[in-house]
Image (spheres, grey):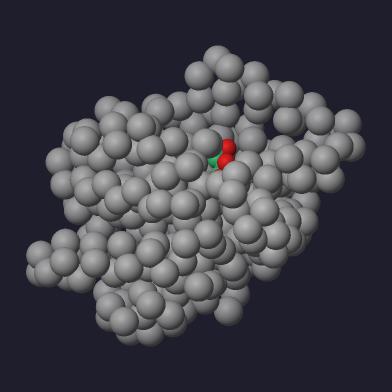
Amino acid sequence: MGVNVGGVELAVEEHGAGMPVVLLHGFPLSSRMWEAIVPALTQVGRVVTVDLRGFGDSEAPQSGYSMDALAGDVMGVAAALHLDRWVLAGHSMGGYVALRVAARWPERLAGLMLVDTRAEPDDAAGRQRREQAMARLRGGERGAFLDEFVANLVAAGARQRAPRLLEELRSMAEAVPVHVLIACLEGMRDRPDSRGLLPTLAVPTLVLVGEEDSITPPGTARAMAEALPKGRLVVIPEAGHTPPLERPVATAEAMLAFLAGEVLGAGT
Ligand code: MLT
């Protein structure tokens, strides 16, 4: 279904009933990345997937791609669906957005699931890599950029083991217009440091990461889980940066156990 947020039509899907669990995808993907996980999560809640502006089936306006602007879109979706308190899950860039929601509207969250993401901002080298990527995209190298980016999203072994997975990731990326890729790289480059936020977050938080994630590695995830008062770390073996696609069963089990035990079990 389409949800209009501030004049922008966002593609949103809902499945199941109960505690709302909102899933945000990473860059340059779409809500399709959660497809294999959604049926399992409906066992415990009402699962809401959102294509962030510019991605999947959502509209792609020229602006509004800072992490805070995307967080505002998420709140617009929550308002349209009359969500009061919910669990928010974000993969990678979706995690940066989730952390902005947590910073500004912590009272609205019953739980957080941070999937292959990080709290620290880009360092100087990271900012430089973003600049180089933006320059390549402006120079017309979209195809080559996406090929390289997508290859890094999965564990090295998966590139041989599961070539269809790369095709699936590439097809999601293919749908993203170049102005959205550039604006999101800029938005990620300029995102704030969320490390100071972590000790203030009172909600149960699952920090999930692929054992072979080279973009947001397990060490980063461990530090994040340790800084969270109610953080729980789960490392998914034989997965890189996209465990929901690479290891959907193990990922769904970890999410379900967290939701059933630490969110719903806590009576929230
Ligand atoms: C993502 O997967 O969303 C991005 O790789 C995150 C990033 O580039 O920082």
Rendering coords of residue 208 (x, y %): 35, 50
Residue lying at the far top in this picture: please name it: 124
Residue at 50% over, 19% down? 123
Q: Quadrant of residue 79?
A: bottom left
Residue at 49% over, 41% down? 213
Vertical position of residue 195 compared to residue 45: above or below: above
Vertical position of residue 194 compared to residue 160: above or below: above
Viewer-proximal residue among 133 and 258: 258
In the picture, measured across the screen, residue 139 lies left or right of residue 182, that is right
Ligand 1 is located in which of the four quadrants?
top right
Instruction: State the quadrant of the N terminus.
Output: bottom right
Rendering coords of residue 87 (x, y %): 30, 62
Viewer-proximal residue among 28 and 66: 28
Residue at 55% over, 15% down? 124
In the picture, measured across the screen, residue 52 lies left or right of residue 250, that is right
Rendering coords of residue 70 (x, y %): 52, 49
Work out whether residue 78 can be spotted: no
